[in-house]
Each structure stands twice: as structure tokens, then as C-alpha cells.
Amino acid sequence: MAAEGGGKEMNEIKTQFTTREGVYKLLTHSEYSRPNRVPFNSQGSNPVKVSFVNVNDQSGNGDRICFNVGRELYFYIYKGVRKAADLSKPIDKRIYKGTQPTCHDFNPLTATAESVSLLVGFSAGQVQLIDPIKKETSKLFNEERLIDKSRVTCVRWVPGSESLFLVAHSSGSMYLYNVENTCGTTAPHYQLLKQGENYAVHTCKSKSARNPLLRWTVGEGALNEFAFSPDGKFLACASQDGFLRVFGFDAAELHGTMKSYFGGLLCVCWSPDGRYIVAGGEDDLVTVWSFLDCRVIARGHGHKSWVSVVAFDHCTTSVEDGDLPAEFSGSDEDFHEQNHFGAGRDRANSSHSRLSKRNSTDSRPVSVTYRFGSVGQDTQLCLWDLTEDILFPHLPLSRTRTHTNVMSATSPPATGQTPSTLSTTTSSGGTNGKDNLSNSSTSGNPTNSLPGTLPRSNSLPHSSNPAGGSTPNSNTGSSNSSSSTTATATTKANSIIDSAFIATSVSKFATLSLHDSRKERHEKDHKRNHSMGHISSKSSDKLNQLSSSKMAKADAAKTLGTTLCPRMEEVPLLEPLVCKKIAHERLTVLIFLEDCLVTACQEGFVCTWARPGKVGLLSSQNNPANSPSGTVV
């Protein structure tokens, strides 16, 4: 893991970190918070969220920032790496009574230096449209809570629209609104428009135009976050039932589904080109899902607690070379034709073979790197690289056909490889951990043309056993659900190669028996669902979750090992490039901007990290007297 040092050093909060591009540095003078800079007591409050908009100001300082802390909402000029923050002069500040802001979103299409449209969702279910520059409150939607009484979890303007916006609630419903329409004085009546597996879309029956235009009910439990694809045509939803569901937005059709390893999914984001989706949640993992193939292509483990935000870095993501591989060609029509998982998988396998042939004969292989980041409740920031060895695996390295039978587990070794027998008993202790991993990982590869060292991608290499094509962790089909959870948990990986087949720190996930996980999750649900706070909240959606929890556990047992949720050893495991503790409280924000990245924690501090080479722009950082304060509009 990238974290340095041990003991006390591990608990120190980092103010800089290094990647291959250079050093990212925390700009202490560019910290935004409440004007008194006092840490917010975050017990029981909603997560701090941050929204940005550019108003195309003539002065070149057009960025504006909005963030919520407890009952308060702030709107500032954001000076980023250029000038120190002036917290004494917020453009707008609002304090709410009886409800708290939970999320917000600017409309980039309508933003000017004189006016911006900001949507704010609240804990009691309302949505407010405000203009923090004109200091106007334009409209309040769901004011009487007739549409939905549960907390607003996510609000977004529909891409390309000046008037449509989508709102998700912890009830599991999403509503499409038009700012021009009223919400009516009675509860809306709905008519079924489209129905599919675990989702339904209803239209609002009304003689005159009113909100909501549509109601989506998605999955079981809360809908924690949704994200529009870069082209605005698709919608990815992360739900508390652990499912990622991707819809064609206009047609309201399900394109594909993925299931978390366990627990709910809390966050989701799209790659800048719309080809990959990353989701994070209560399994402490980040999961990379291919939009084209409708399958999990990698998981990343670096967090020690729930992952709260995932985001792609559009500035560091690069596709080099003019010759795009097979999977980078194709039209939107191709995507629409692959609504079934099987079709996506068949195409993936054929394109793998085409690509491996191309890479073996072409002198200029394609170079693809997607950079994404994640922050979690463990107060850690992780950065990840998704590289071509994961995206387009060569056939000898491919894990797409992992065999989990006894024959392949004990298949004849390659030349020069020490035979390593894989124990399939449940009481093996730590005997099949370090020794077998090191035997397997130091094996030669004379039968294929792969280089001796795998490209530095901070992702764990695939199995390179050409005889059986199995991975050392596959054991037997049944042993995955019965092997000891301590089998490899006690071993220590000395390098990336030693941990080539599965990081020892994650082996508790890889070998968790279904019986144990069901028991643990039941205890966890019991503590969460039967606390006084839970019962007294009286929210109907949580009570509904209680009744469906048994069914959800049965479903989880069925999905493990399928395309929906592959086992840990069936997909590559990424290691983070960077894994640093950067806050005292849980992290709730990660946003990549052109010259910096922005994080925020539950104490209400919004931090700016200058990208390599950008720190010098803040020339007046150490002399605030010389920095002209931002003019209040």
C-alpha cells in the first residue's frame, strides 16, 4: 500500500502526496469553511457537500463554490490556487430551521455573473430553487411533502436542460421536475409508464401541467446517488440494496446491472468518455464496471471503511495513440443492442482476442490510462489508475474464464515453476497463505511472450498459469464458501508481486464464507435497525427495509459468483497509487478541477490541493495583506 511509515506516522494527516505527475500540495490559505473556522460538531448531521459553477466572469475569476455545513449554506467566490480564501465575505449565507440542506447543484447553462440557478435538497424532502447572487428564493418544490416525505439524497439538473431536474430520495424514488410547473395542492396520482426488473416508471396523471413529470421507483431501500453519463443519455443509480442500475434515461430502459460485494452502494461516477462506471460503498471497495460489456472488470481495495465518493480525474485520464483498439470503436447503436449481459460478454471475449493479436503484432500498442479517486469514512484519499492491462487483458493473462474445479487447481505447473498444492480444507489455518502465493508468483513464464515484469499500473497482475488457466485463489468451487477466513489474513505481502493474486489485506473478503457473512450482516442490521434512533425516526422507508432484509440476503447469496457480482479472485484487484489520511473526520467530497482537486470532511472544511506545478500561482499566499479581497456582487 502507498501509505508510508507505521505507528504514529500512520495517524498523521498528510498535507502532500506524490504521483508520477509530481507532488500535490494542500493549500492551507485556500481552505473554505464557516467564517469562524471552528470545526463543526457533525453528530447526526447530513454530509457536507460542495458544488461548483463558473459564471464566465470578465475578471477571469469566475468560479463560485457552494457548500452546506449543518443547517447552514454558504456561497463564495472560489479563488482556488490563485488567491487566499476570504471567508469574511460570503456572497450569500443561509441558515435553515427545522430542516437541513443535504445536496445541491448549479445549472451551468444559465449561470452568469449576475444570476445563477442553484437547486438545494433538504432532509425533510423539499427542494428549493435559489439565486444566491440576486439573493432570491425562486421556488420551493414538494413544499407540503405531498410528493415524498423522505430525505433528498441527490439532486441534479438534467444535462442540456435549463428547466428539468431530477431528485432522488431515501425512499428509493426519483422524481423528474420542471421548474416552470407547480407541485399542486393534492398528492399526485400516477399511471404506470414502464416496468422492469426491480424498477418502475410512472407518469403523473393531471389535466394541467404539474410536478412531478415522472416518478421512478428503483430497487429496495434508499437511492443513495445517481449520475448522468457525459452525453446525458444514460443514468447510473447506486442503491442501498447494493445494486448499480444503468438506465437509458429517455426510454427509461434498463441497460445493465451490477451488485456490490456486500452492503449498499453509496456513490457512483462515469469516466469522461462514458465507457466505464465506478461505484463505491459499504464493502470498502471501488468497483469498475464496463458500460459496453455490462460486467465488472476490476475492483480496488485501499479503504478501511465505507467509500463515500468516487470521481474520475478528467485532466489525468489519457488515451494516447491514433489507433484505437476494437473496444474503442462502435456507435451508440451498438451499446443499445447489448442490453443483455450475455451479448456483452460474448463481444468482450471476441474483442479481447482481436486486441491481443493486434498488440502482439503492432509496434505501437495503445496506451490508455483512466485516473479516478475515492474518499471514505476512514478519512483517506485514494487515487487509482485504470490501465490497458486491466481494460484489454492479453489472452494468456485473461481472467475471463477462471476455472474453479479440482483439476485446474492442481494442474501441471509450467516449466521452472514449483508445484504448489492448494488446500481445500476449512481448517488449514495460515498454511496455504504466504508459501503458496510466493511459489506461484515467482514462477517463470516461458510458454508465453509476456515480459518478465508487468507494466507498472498499481493493479495486481492476472494469473499467468498457462496450463490450467486457473488462479491460485480459485481453490475448488465449494471451497470459496467454506474456507477459513484466516487462511491468508495473517500473511504479509512484501511487494506487488508477492501479493500478485490477491492482496492479503483483502483476503478476508476473498474467502468470506457465505454463512459467516450472512450472520455478520444480520448482527449489523440488528444493531442498525433496532437502535432507539432508528425506531424513533418513524420513517416509512426504513421500516420497509426491515421487512425486505431477509429477501435481500437470499438474493445476495444467489448473485455472488455470477456476472452481477464476481468473486474476488475472478476479477483483477487494483492497488491504490496513493492512499493517504487527509482529515480528522470522515470525508464527504472529492472533486477534480483543472488546476487542483477539492476535498471536504464532515467538520466543514473544504480543502484545495494544488496539482503539480500549480502551487506557484498562489503568489500572495503568505502575505494576505497584498491580496485584494474579492468584490461582493
Image: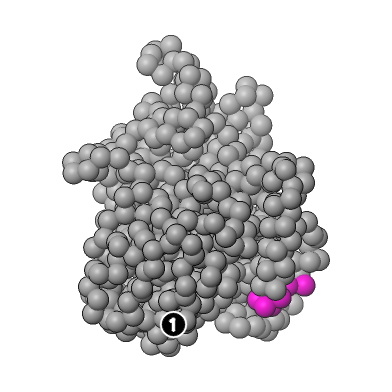
Quarter of the image where the C terminus is located: top right
Q: Position of residue 81 (x, y in %)?
A: 49, 26
Question: In the displayed image of the protein, which residue is found farthest to the left?
Answer: 8
Residue sitting at 37 percent across and 32 percent down? 16
Q: Nearer the viewer, residue 451 or 26?
A: 451
Residue labelled with disc 1 = 406
Q: Is residue 137 visible?
A: no
Residue sitting at 48 percent across and 52 percent down? 459
Residue sitting at 37 percent across and 37 percent down? 33
Q: Position of residue 296 (x, y in %)?
A: 55, 67
Q: Is residue 404 visible?
A: yes
Inspect the image, locate mark 1, and give the three-letter code of the amino acid beneath it: Val
Q: Which of 4 and 553 is in front in this view?
A: 4
- The vertical placement of 545 against 279, above or below, is below
Q: How crowded is mark 1: few (under 14 residues within 10 Å), some or many (20 or more)?
A: some
Q: What colour scheme was applied to this rendering of the protein?
A: one colour
- The vertical placement of 364 against 513, above or below, is above
Q: Nearer the viewer, residue 411 or 243?
A: 411
Residue sitting at 44 percent across and 76 percent down? 409
Residue 419: quarter of image: bottom left
Tag count: 1
- Which stretch appears magenta? 337-343
